[in-house]
Image: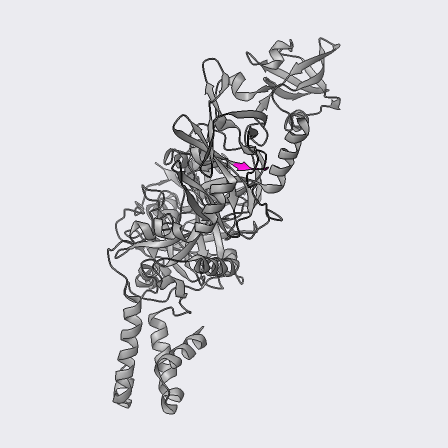
């Protein structure tokens, strides 16, 4: 600066002017806050997503239990088939270990549907098929692929009034992937690798294994006709099963070869425990996450913070096309959606079963 | 970068030939050092975006993300993990003080692709939660550009600016990669800025970028409300830059506690031997036992310094604290071994 001043005073003015200009435009507003309506979840920013909101209003359903919204569903067909997250449709009683379907009502657009049929459910993906009596619904438009770049805007249903939906916005924030967790369907036994198969180390009360008469010490040699070398061989078979499915178990007891058929059950109906306990520090700092929030074969991850009563609806792009179904608020800062390819597979499976 | 600004500046303020040839470049240089002046995205100065602006935001985010992701790292400490970002080709890393926790500590980083490197913590500023690390292996590392504004007034970031965060939430996960989140600057104070990018444990120390991919702050702590999270702005790093590079522990907390010298505990009993110090007793529960030191070993050197008297080890321990790492040279069955021992608490 000294150099400039001594060399050419005339330009000093320009210099100062320039600094002032730059400084002014960069002056942080100390201690001031951005008004809440201008934040990412604020009303004024939400208003820019009006086109996407209209898609949600018409092509997704709001599900109510009494007066309370408990989730959303994707409109799959003109004649009233809806795909949604399954576990939020049930009340689970830890004492009786039983799921009871909630009494639900549905609103699409401004139309109410009080007669809702629960047609099918899949526990692997935690999806369910609903049917309402309708004829001219607007089915969701699916994108060509769920493969979109990280950083892409995604829009979901936020809170809602009876008449008007609100958006909840964010971005695709990580790679699509498998999320591990406890399988939702179980035999109800403890297993340990042993010579010639897998040894049963314990049998749970109220489990399918107990009902079928399996005992501690039995060595499983075949499961659904597949040779068993270690635990994983059994788990791989169970992974794709539903509660109520029956499986063939070949085992040896005191040297004798036996074969029993047993029923696989919903994990929580055996253990009485629902969902992962909020054990980590990260979990304790939150609270609004879904009970079923892990053990999905593949998910998309977004930075949208749904609460557990805002899942089940479509995840849409800026062009209004859906790339998945919102399946869980996983923790403080992560939400998952089932990608459209897998959601469509499950839907097609449901329709074939009818 | 400088050239872009140079043209930008000329366009805005000058036509003269003399100015063009002589003064403007100097001027541009000075102004450039005051402010990171990559083209400021126009949408930052709109109070509310419209649908078109949203697409522009998405475009910048995708372009910048590609540039900066490779420089974002997961930092693995003893029990937990945090994040950090490489800011020079030779591997200087910025992170939070509560992630590095002290000076001269050795830890590992994991790059986006899973590659691991050893790092050592340089200095930190314990009052604002700023810290530096250095990758130990020489190499050419991916790095990001940082906001050059030296003070809060000259920092490029403004209230309402669109920003994005990266971090290895909850630790490194190769299938998932680092997690990106979008938000706006919602509050600016003297030594912190707040954004509504969502954060979670493990993100601490990770980078907050403007939409050009310039590093503007480091994640410090999560807010009580999910979308109010604190970051340490770059000007705080600039203020303490030299001292941090010289591995100075600055300030009295609360984000890191000064080590208490002499507090470190190895858990061995020694006596003078022929080739060094004979280890005659090992506390299996203390760091010696945990790191595999055995009764009968001969300690010949610590951190490269030969050990022949008990007092030498005692004197060395007076200069070390809990959490410091010592390199032991051990003779066992005639073979020389190198064992790293992290000091426990007495």
The quarter in which the C terminus of chain A is drawn is top right
Using the rendered image of the protein, determine whether residue A156 is visible from the camera's viewpoint.
Answer: yes
Q: Is residue A95 magenta?
A: no
Q: How many marks can you see?
A: 0
Across and down, in percent, residue B102 comes to: 36, 49
At horizontal 63% and vertical 28% (from top left) the residue drawn is A239
Q: Main secondary structure of the magenta part?
A: loop
Q: Nearer the viewer, residue A2 or B321?
A: A2
Residue A297 x, y percent position in the rendering: 60, 36
Comparing A214 with A155, the one in front is A155
Q: Hey, which quadrant is residue B11 in on the image?
A: bottom left
Is residue B109 left or right of A67 when viewed as pictured? right
Residue closest to the eye, A154 or A124: A154
**In the rendering, at what x and y percent does residue A74 appear?**
53, 37
Snapshot quadrant of residue B213: bottom left
For the point 47% across and 40% down, the residue is A335
* Magenta highlight range: A74-78
Q: Nearer the viewer, residue A107 or B159?
A: A107
Percent across and percent down for residue A180 are 56, 34
């Amino acid at each position: 600066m000294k150099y400039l001043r001594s060399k050419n005073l005339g330009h000093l003015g320009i210099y100062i002017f320039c600094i002032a200009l730059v400084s002014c435009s960069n002056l942080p507003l100390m201690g001031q806050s951005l008004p809440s309506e201008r934040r990412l979840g604020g009303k004024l920013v939400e208003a820019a997503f009006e086109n996407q909101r209209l898609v949600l209003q018409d092509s997704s359903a709001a599900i109510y239990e009494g007066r309370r919204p408990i989730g959303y569903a994707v409109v799959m067909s003109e004649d009233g088939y809806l795909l949604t997250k399954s576990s939020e449709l049930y009340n689970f009683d830890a004492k009786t270990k039983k799921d009871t379907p909630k009494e639900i009502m549905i609103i699409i657009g401004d139309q109410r549907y009080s007669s809702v049929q629960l047609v099918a459910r899949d526990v692997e993906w935690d999806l369910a098929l609903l049917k309402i009596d309708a004829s001219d619904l607007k089915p969701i438009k699916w994108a060509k692929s769920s493969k979109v770049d990280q950083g892409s805007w995604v829009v979901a249903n936020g809170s809602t009034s009876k008449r008007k939906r609100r958006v909840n916005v964010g971005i695709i924030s990580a790679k699509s992937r498998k999320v591990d967790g406890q399988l939702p369907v179980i035999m109800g036994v403890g297993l340990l690798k042993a010579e010639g198969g897998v040894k049963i180390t314990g049998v749970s009360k109220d489990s399918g294994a107990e009902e079928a008469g399996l005992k501690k010490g039995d060595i499983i040699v075949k499961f659904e006709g597949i040779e068993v070398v270690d635990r994983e061989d059994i788990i791989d078979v169970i992974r794709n099963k539903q509660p109520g499915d029956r499986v063939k178990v070949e085992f040896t007891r005191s040297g004798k070869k036996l074969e029993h058929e047993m029923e696989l059950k919903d994990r929580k109906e055996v253990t009485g425990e629902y969902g992962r306990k909020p054990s980590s520090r990260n979990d304790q700092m939150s609270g609004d996450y879904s009970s079923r929030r892990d053990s999905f074969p593949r998910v998309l991850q977004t930075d949208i913070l749904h609460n557990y009563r805002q899942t089940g609806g479509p995840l849409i792009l800026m062009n209004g096309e859906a790339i998945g179904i919102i399946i869980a608020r996983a923790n403080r800062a992560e939400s998952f959606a089932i990608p459209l390819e897998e959601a469509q597979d499950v839907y097609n499976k449901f329709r074939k079963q009818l | 970068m400088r050239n872009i600004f140079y043209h930008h500046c000329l366009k805005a303020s000058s036509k003269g030939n003399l100015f063009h040839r002589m003064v403007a470049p100097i001027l541009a240089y000075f102004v450039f050092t005051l402010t990171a002046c990559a083209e400021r995205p126009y949408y930052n100065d709109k109070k509310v975006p419209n649908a078109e602006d949203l697409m522009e935001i998405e475009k910048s985010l995708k372009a910048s993300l590609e540039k900066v992701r490779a420089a974002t790292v997961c930092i693995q400490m003893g029990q937990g993990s945090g994040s950090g970002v490489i800011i020079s080709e030779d591997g200087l890393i910025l992170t939070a003080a509560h992630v590095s926790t002290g000076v001269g500590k050795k830890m590992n980083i994991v790059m986006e692709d899973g590659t691991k490197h050893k790092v050592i913590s340089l200095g930190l500023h314990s009052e604002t939660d700023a810290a530096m690390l250095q990758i130990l292996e020489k190499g050419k590392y991916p790095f990001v550009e940082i906001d050059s504004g030296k003070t809060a007034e000259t920092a490029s970031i403004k209230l309402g600016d669109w920003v994005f965060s990266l971090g290895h939430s909850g630790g490194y996960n190769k299938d998932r990669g680092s997690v990106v989140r979008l938000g706006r600057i919602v509050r600016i104070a003297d030594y912190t800025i707040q954004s509504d990018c969502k954060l979670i444990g493990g993100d601490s120390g990770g980078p907050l970028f403007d939409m050009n991919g310039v590093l503007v702050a480091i994640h410090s702590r999560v807010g009580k409300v999910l979308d109010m999270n604190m970051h340490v702005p770059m000007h705080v790093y600039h203020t303490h830059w030299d001292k941090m590079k010289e591995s100075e522990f600055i300030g009295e907390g609360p984000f890191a506690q000064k080590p208490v010298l002499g507090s470190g505990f190895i858990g061995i009993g020694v006596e003078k031997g022929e080739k060094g110090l004979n280890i005659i007793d090992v506390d299996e529960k203390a760091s010696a036992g945990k790191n595999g030191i055995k009764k009968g070993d001969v300690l010949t050197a610590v951190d490269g310094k030969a050990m022949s008297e008990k007092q030498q080890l005692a004197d060395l321990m007076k200069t070390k604290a809990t959490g410091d790492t010592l390199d032991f040279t051990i003779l066992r069955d005639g073979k020389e071994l190198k064992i790293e021992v992290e000091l426990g608490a007495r």
